[in-house]
Image (cartoon, rainbow, N blue to C red):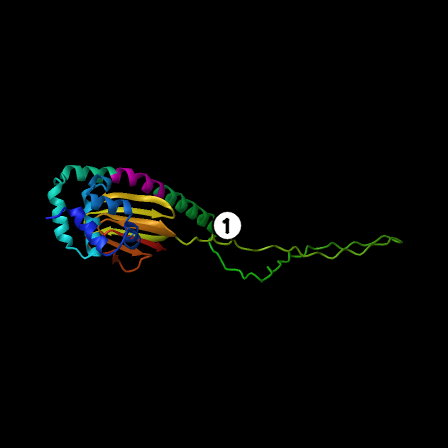
Amino acid sequence: MPALGDEFRSAREARGLTLSDVAEQLHIRSVYLNAIETEDWKAIGAPVYIRGFIRTYSRFLGLDAESAIAQYNETVPAERPSQAVAAISDDDDRAGPSLWAVIAVVVAIGLVGFVGYEWWSYAQGGGEREPVAASTTPPATVAPATAVPTVVPAAGATVAPAAPAQPTPTATGSATGAQRVAPAHQLIIRLTERSWLHVTVDGVPLVEGIFPAGTTRTLNGHSAYVRAGNAGGVVVSVDGGRPLRLGKEGDVVEQRYTL
């Protein structure tokens, strides 16, 4: 039986394709495809990535994906669960707490500021806030006229006429409400199976590592890039829309979202 890497190389060359041609169509870096053909598994990394790349490359070349993965499994020792769990724990500690702590602090500050402004506006309006049209001129309130005593002029004296009382306008108005900023759009990622994830939001890497089934990540931003090592176990929901599976089980899939 030919070596696994030789099978991939022969099948690719039989189709007249270069590694660059395959990399462009599969969106897998040519260095990983070359590692499969030379069986340089350390150049790829964890076995879960290797199996995903082998399955995707096999389907592209028309080879039996399950048979190829079985050949690979015979050449490497089985994964130790303790190492996988430790890797997941390390990734969660590195990527999770600091980000969510910052988000929680920002949200808390925003809520305190908003509640404080609403209370101040309510107090300034005497408990009632009436809308005022932008083009309406506030009515003037005329102060009541004060009584003017009658003066009897002395003989030969001239008395100047009293100046008429001037109305004292009182400006009225109401405080405008705070402008509300629309919340940032959301990307929700939920894992139904163990998978490797790499997520970048607005150009900033936020999630990377191997995560177990049941993991959920909610991210806010305007654009997102998602790469998954086991796309069949990744469900994505954009802006509260219907959750959709990212791809097939074992596939390595890249996807960009505009939120």
Residue drawn 53% across and 60% down? Answer: 132
Query: Residue furthest toward the right?
Result: 156
Q: How many marks?
A: 1
Q: Is residue 233 visible?
A: no
Image location of residue 87, percent across then percent down: 21, 38
- Secondary structure beneath label 1: helix
Residue drawn 31% across and 47% down? Answer: 199
From the viewer's side, name the closer residue of 168 and 11.
11
Report which quarter residue 160 is drawn in: bottom right
Q: Is residue 142 visible?
A: yes
The C terminus: image quadrant: bottom left
Residue drawn 33% across and 50% down? Answer: 225
Give, as a single range, the part of the protein colored magenta: 91-103
Report which quarter residue 64 is drawn in: bottom left
From the viewer's side, name the closer residue of 15 and 242.
15
Tell me the crowding category of disc 1: few under 14, some 14 to 19, or many 20 or more residues within 10 angstroms, Cα based: few
Report which quarter residue 241 is drawn in: bottom left
Image location of residue 248, percent across then percent down: 21, 56
Residue 80 among magenta residues? no
Image location of residue 117, percent across then percent down: 46, 48
Q: For the residue marked with disc 1, what is the amino acid?
A: Gln
Q: Is residue 142 left or right of residue 80?
A: right
Magenta segment's dominant SS is helix
The answer to whether residue 187 is above or below residue 43 is: below
From the viewer's side, name the closer residue of 236 and 164.
236
Image location of residue 235, percent across then percent down: 24, 54
Residue tagged by mark 1? 124
Q: Is residue 175 left or right of residue 239?
A: right
